[in-house]
Image: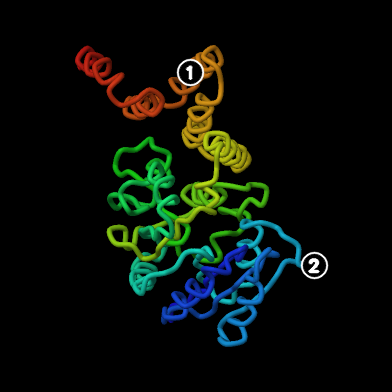
Amino acid sequence: MFKVSVIVPVYNAANFLAKAVDSILIQPEVGEIVLIEDQSKDNSYQIAKQLSEQHAIIKLITHPNHVNRGASASRELGIEMASFPFVAFLDADDYYLPNRFNFEPQIFEIHSDADGVYGATGFAYYSEDGKERYAKYNSTGLTTLDRAVPPDELFYVLSGISKKANGYFHLNALTIKKAAVAPNRAGNFNPNMGLHEDTEWIFRLSLKTKLYPGSIDHAIAMRGVHNDNRIVKNQAEYVTKHIMYKTVYTWAKANNLTPEQTSIVRLNMLAVKLFLVNYICALTIIICLFINYFKLVRNRTYIRRILERLFGENTFRYFFSVYKQKTL
């Protein structure tokens, strides 16, 4: 029987935690809820303790000496303490919808090689100010892929190289086998990242595991958007994204990925860096990209995607149409 441990890092979520837990309790596939209280400054711990006393399937844990370790370390501790072979995640200010695990048991049964299943996440706006500031990050109402892709293509889609699909998915909509986080596979969350740590981990998962699409057309979880969201408050978006891609690139080099995969990760890192430097440095980066990628990525489709990624889709459309005619 399919049973899952749901891991919930808790930090300053007193206004949302009860709703999050209630949304998990109604899921028949949930075997336990692991709350990791991360030394909140509000009364989150008291609420979490009360909930654990009311429901036997709730396991409340803290870091040693009740120190604050951040979301990554909290999720890592939650995975370590999980009792079931499947784990899912929920941020304490978000909530699941009743259909959260409708697809997962069947997909894991059909695909024997499946390590994880992902779906779509919607948005619940708790303030107009938060809604307005978050609009630039998502205008469709869903965080998802716009079409299903095979697991072997997922990395290229998430990297923006493949046009077989667009988008990405949120951690709230991912169910993963606990075995997939072994050190020789995707590994654990990076505790040194303060932002985008979930996206960085998903990149690694897409390279080292088989992730299948589940409910990508309809939301299975809702992300709470309010004024205190870390992503909404982030004033240095390109700085933090560059750190994320640099972290993935360091990991890629250490884990013997293919030259093509490593080069694509480096592409993302350098493409973001273009927004952080002056024009002379940007030109140097662009020259570096051409030198490296024409050597490593010999497929014309990938070269075109690289140029579109850096300069926009229309800029080189005419160039490649002429080039194609000359090579026919």
**Circles 1 and 2: CB atoms closer than 8 Å:** no
Residue placed at 35% from the left, 53% from the top? 144
Cα distance between the residues tagged 1 and 2: 48 Å
**Residue toward you, 47 or 170:** 47
Name the spot of residue 150 as percent of width and height, x first.
34, 51
Q: Which residue is mark 1?
A: 286
Q: Quadrant of residue 214?
A: bottom left
Quadrant where the N terminus is found in the figure: bottom left
* Residue behind mark 2: 65
In the orientation shown, which residue stands out farthest toward the front? 128
* Residue 63 in picture, x, y percent from top left: 73, 66
Say which amino acid is labelled 1.
Ile
Disc 2 element: helix
- Quadrant hosting residue 308: top left
Secondary structure of residue under mark 1: helix
| Residue depicted at x 54% and y 27% | 273
